[in-house]
Amino acid sequence: MTGHRAIKDSGLERRLFKSRLVIIAALVGAGLLGLVGRLAYLQVYAYEHFATLSEDNRVRLVPLPPPRGLIYDRNGVLLARNLPQYRLELVPEEIDDLGATLEQLRGLVDIRPVDIERFRSAVQRQQPFQGAPLRFNLGEQELARIAVNRHRFPGVAIKAHLGRHYPLARHGAHAVGYVGRLSEGDLARLDRRHYQGTSHVGKLGVERHYERRLHGEAGLEQVEVNAQGRRLRVLEREPPVPGEDIVLTLDARLQLVAETALDGRPGAVVAMDPGNGEVLALASMPSFDPNPFVNGLAERDYRALRDDPARPLFNRALAGQYPPGSTIKPVMALAGLEHGVVEPDERMFAGPYYRLPNRSRKYRDWKAGGHGWVDLGKAITQSCDVFFYDLAYRLGIDRMAAFLGRFGLGERTGIDVGGEASGLVPTREWKRGAHGEPWYPGETVIAGIGQGYMLTTPLQLATVAATLATRGERYRPHLLHAVTGSAGGEFEVVQPEALPPVGLSQDGHWQQVIEPMVGVMHEPNGTAYWTAGRDAAYEMAGKTGTAQVFGLEEGEEYDAEAIQRRLRDHALFLAFAPAQDPRIAVAVIVEHGGGGGSVAAPVARAVMDYYLLALDHWDGQARG
């Protein structure tokens, strides 16, 4: 037989099967061991990590913005309040195509480029699951259009909130200020933790200065949501702490009187209580309506305000710097008495001009024929320039500057609102540093009547009037009168801050200057008698001032009718009343108004009349 059949090796087959079985069992065992190890890792070692992730998917932390504190005037008139409003919010995490959604929403509501810019900025600084505001203060028609189309916009919601509103609009706007939408610049200076969920912040005035008090503390909600991000229930809630309500020293009715008395002319009025530094009125005209600023002014409207030649956004009461003119003559007189340069009964012949020794230049008096023989009292009452030219020359700029500084001139008062200018009391050192030149005697002469380099603000002049009224006692001017207390919503009155007094070597010097200031108002030859003091029902002390805007050449005559209005003199006035028991001190400036006695003094008279007569009468009826 040539062929044969292979013999099957069953032993070999069994060995191969067993080896394969062992390999498969080892692989299965290794897989099971790896699965058990992974399960142990997830369930034991990484439990907290994944539990947290799971909780974050189920629970969200929602910040709760606090209600902003209210602002009242001293009589309870609301100056800043919160009104219910509706805003349009978008949750980026719930929107597939944000750009397309924004474009579609433009067909339903008015959305400006600035709204989109601010919305994108808000999105960048918060969590994607948090709603970012796109439009504030929606109108009824806009609300209706969004409600009808709500099903087309996942992630888009209408939220009720409290929006800031200023009932008196432009009246007192520079003092109260306004809030605006949060910017990156705001967050850079604020604690972000306290502004989660907050969309607005104080931008100007009291709203900015007292931001910390007014804002309050944000709250927090733990909210359970489903897979689509819908709220299911609130797990825990920490309510927000409302901002404090504050009461200002301002009197809203007096503020309106002051603004009305300016009669549309650019200028400022500051009224104070000389006994404690409370600012009763802080008027700067023209003014502006702060309400459009709250949710964002259109660029076109803002440019119109910014570029307006009348400068309605400029706070003249705090930041306006003007030569004080003759309003500083009472302080100059006190300096002369204190340094023994002049005696109350000392007389000099005041002709139409003054000359420095061995100099030919003539420094003219405002009165063409001069005042004749004058003493200190007559020089103040009739505002004799020649007398004060001579007084300034004998005092010298060093003693003048030091004494004016004791009244707070040349430095900020420290009032509790931003934007205050410092004014300027020039010195030898200042001129050398600013101009690189020495000080000249002629500059001392004109500084004696508040001209030259000297600059003051209306607020500083009001503090000078208050210091004269109190015979040297000084208080820091302030706008905050009271804040919400810790118990039962009661208000706690803020105590005034006393400043170093202007102590004089003889108390009689005060009356030697104040009596002629009374003469300014109540003597027929006083510079404000015929326009403001003649028929007054109370005794007041005042001083007129006229500040040149540009210098005249020697021998050149000033003709108000022949020059442009912007080059005409400023009209200034300061006063306090009643003269012997002062309750109010006032400073007024009317830009390019002309004479202080004819233009500024009647404004102050209207303010003092209301405060001392009409306001007292009204309060008496209210109490009765």
Image (cartoon, rainbow, N blue to C red):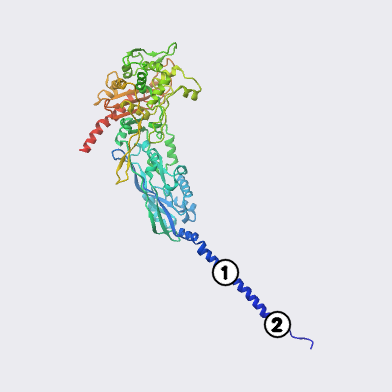
- Is 472 or 143 nearer to us in this picture? 472
Mark in the foreground, 2 or 1 = 1
Q: Judge whether 399 appears above or below 210 on screen.
A: above
Image x and y of residue 230, in percent: 42, 59
Q: Secondary structure at mark 2?
A: loop
Q: Residue at x 37, y 41 (%)?
A: 291
Q: Earlier in the sequence, mark 2 or mark 1?
A: 2
Image x and y of residue 515, in percent: 29, 21
Q: Distance of mark 2 from mark 1, alpha carbons? A: 36 Å
Q: Quadrant of the C terminus?
A: top left
Q: Residue at x 46, y 48 (%)?
A: 122
Image x and y of residue 143, in percent: 38, 52
In the image: residue 302, left or right of residue 514: right
Q: Secondary structure at mark 1?
A: helix
Question: In this view, which residue lies farthest toward the left?
Answer: 624
CB within 8 Å, label 2 to label 1: no
Q: Residues within 10 Å of mark 2 (few under 14, many from 20)?
A: few
Q: Quadrant of the N terminus?
A: bottom right
Judging by the rendered image, the residue that carries numbered circle 1 is 33
Q: Residues within 10 Å of mark 1 (few under 14, many from 20)?
A: few
Residue 9 marker: 2
Image quadrant where residue 420 sits = top left
- Is 292 or 407 nearer to us in this picture? 407
Question: In this view, which residue lies farthest toward the top?
Answer: 358
Q: Amino acid at mark 2?
A: Asp
Q: Is residue 595 visible?
A: no
Residue 258 marker: none
